Image (cartoon, rainbow, N blue to C red):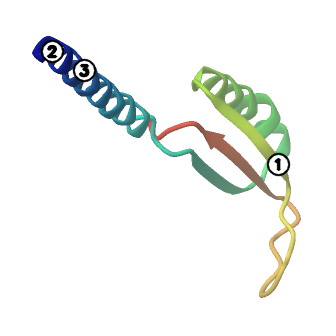
Amino acid sequence: MKSKYTLALGLVAGVAVGAVAVEALHAQQGKPVYTIAQIEIKDSDAYMKEFAPKAQAALKKAPASQFLAAGPATKIEGEPPPPSTRVTVRRYNSME
């Protein structure tokens, strides 16, 4: 009879340790990170020829990143941005 209790207690302890380990693994996953970039383009030809291809190549190397939005800046309140201002929003799965 004692061996049944020992076996049951061992099973319960194993399940508890497993649950704690799974919870620790989930906690290590990190929260998503969002970046908002605002740039003012003064020379659109140079931007398209030199900057844009390098920036796109670097962003493609970033693991698990997602392009959410891009376009010209819009005034909500205050001073309007110059017409050459662009805004991008990206999402990364974690800070790493």
Quadrant position of the C terminus in the picture: top left
Can you tell which of label 1 and label 3 is closer to the viewer?
3
> Secondary structure beneath disc 2?
loop
- Read off the residue under disc 2: 1
- Read off the residue under disc 1: 70
Position of 17 with respect to 49 (left or right) is left
Identify the residue shown where x is 15% and y is 15%: 1
Labelled disc at residue 90? none
Labelled disc at residue 8? 3
Position of 63 with respect to 11 (left or right) is right
Residue furthest to the bottom = 78
Q: Kindly indicate the quadrant of the structure image that contains residue 5.
A: top left
Instruction: Inspect the image, locate mark 2, and give the three-letter code of the amino acid beneath it.
Output: Met
Identify the residue shown where x is 39% and y is 40%: 27
| Whole-number angstrom distance, CA of label 2 to CA of label 3 | 11 Å
User: Residue 21: percent from the left, percent from the top?
Assistant: 31, 28
Graded by Cα atoms within 10 Å as few (under 14), some (14 to 19) or many (20 or more), the crowding at tag 3 reads few
| Whole-number angstrom distance, CA of label 1 to CA of label 2 | 69 Å
